[in-house]
Image (cartoon, rainbow, N blue to C red):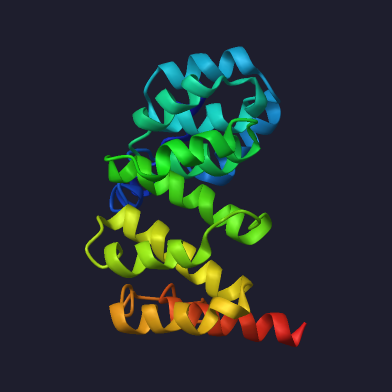
Amino acid sequence: MADLAVLEDPKMRRVNEKHGDDHGVNLGKLRALAKQLKTQQDLSRELWATGDTAARLLSLLICRPKAFERDELDTMLREARAPKVHDWLVNYVVKKSPYAEELRLSWFEDPDPVVASAGWALTTERVAKKPEGLDLPGLLDIVETEMKDAPDRLQWAMNHCLAQIGIDHPEHRARAVDIGERLEVLKDYPTPPNCTSPFAPAWIAEMVRRKEAS
């Protein structure tokens, strides 16, 4: 915790707070600290228990993902309100857990939209890597009826799933593009030069172009 306090940068905190993340630690320096510590599951749990956002991010970098029980991961996700902590927990830990599919199904229809967004993130991972058994037309039905009015983080996760279906599954691409064009979700999202827009039709078109060019 003393090391994390030294890394605290007020300017970085102001930038992060605009995105809902209450910490001021440069993530490159945080990763360097994690590299020094290496994997330490007990320390990881202690850092998580502090409730401090920077400590929790460090915790997720030094943990052993398969060492967490299902209910422990469920509790951690419901505690992880900072977007970066939520994102790292899902991507660095839950996706590597033997309980990933069980949690995906549990979280997907959770009444808490932040929890549900994690279920959608895990579903997007399956769309890309293991789509067998997924009801892709059914997912598009849900996106079509619910994404427009979904809370921000759930909407973002649904939009990613929509784009992933369009990118990876040509038989559903026209419908995915059509849904994106009609709903116009993230159409005006400010996108830096040389970055791909999160607007699903543009995102799909660019990723398909890259695939075909490679």
What's the residue at 40%, 60% (across, down)? 158
Q: Quadrant of residue 101?
A: top right
User: x, y percentage for residue 153?
Assistant: 33, 53
User: x, y percentage for residue 125?
Assistant: 58, 53
Foreground residue, 111 or 74? 111
Q: Quadrant of residue 199?
A: bottom left
Q: Image height check: is 145 above or below 66?
A: below
User: x, y percentage for residue 71?
Assistant: 47, 20
Q: Image height check: is 119 above or below 167?
A: above
What's the residue at 36%, 84% (across, down)? 181
Extreme residue toward the left, this view: 149
Query: Is any atom of residue 84 visible in this view?
Result: no
User: x, y percentage for residue 82?
Assistant: 35, 39
What's the residue at 38%, 26% (across, down)? 52
Q: Quadrant of residue 128?
A: bottom right
Extreme residue toward the right, this view: 214
Q: Image height check: is 95 above or below 186?
A: above
Query: Is any atom of residue 77 visible in this view?
Result: yes
Image mark count: 0
